């Protein structure tokens, strides 16, 4: 049963659509409609983010195809992604590649 989702192929985080317990599976469809399963590293509240792959420290967090912050430290696939491991970053929007 699908219990997570991503919106854009560039996303490195998804959103759970029901509460997920540590050790259980997060199941979502990728941009090609393939079923992907990720093991939850943490308990994740409904509508919170999870890492769909490992995200290295200072790499952009991408949700809905847009940068929403930077990884404060390396975030493991299946981890809860929230204010405890994401830092804000001001981007140079005038020179940003689209």
Image: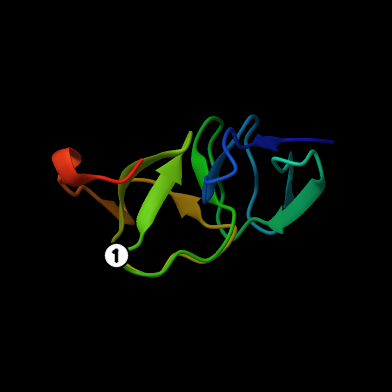
Q: Is 72 located above or below residue 1 in the figure?
A: below
Question: Residue at coordinates 35% horizontally, 54% vertically from top-left?
Answer: 60
Query: Badge 1 local density, few (<14 within 10 Å), some, or many (20+)?
Result: some
Q: Point out the image quarter for the C terminus.
A: top left
Q: Is 9 located above or below residue 53 in the figure?
A: above
Number of numbered tags placed on the structure image? 1
Question: Residue at coordinates 52% horizontally, 66% vertically from top-left?
Answer: 54
Q: Point out the image quarter for the N terminus.
A: top right
**Horizontal placement of 75 versus 21: left or right?**
left
Question: Residue at coordinates 53% horizontally, 37% vertically from top-left?
Answer: 45
**Horizontal placement of 92 versus 53: left or right?**
left
| Secondary structure found at label 1 | loop
Q: How is the image coloured?
A: rainbow
In the image shown, does 86 or 40 lie closer to the viewer? 86
What residue does disc 1 label?
58
Q: Position of residue 21 (x, y in %)?
A: 65, 48
Q: Is 60 located above or below residue 18 in the figure?
A: below
């Amino acid at each position: 049963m699908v219990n997570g989702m991503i919106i854009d192929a560039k996303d490195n985080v998804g959103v759970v659509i029901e509460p997920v317990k540590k050790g259980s599976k997060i199941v979502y469809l990728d941009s090609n409609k393939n079923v992907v399963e990720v093991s939850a590293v943490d308990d994740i509240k409904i509508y919170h983010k999870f890492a769909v792959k490992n995200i290295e420290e200072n790499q952009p967090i991408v949700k809905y195809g847009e940068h929403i912050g930077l990884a404060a430290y390396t975030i493991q696939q299946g981890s809860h992604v929230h204010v405890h491991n994401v830092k804000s970053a001001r981007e140079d929007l005038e020179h940003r590649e689209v």
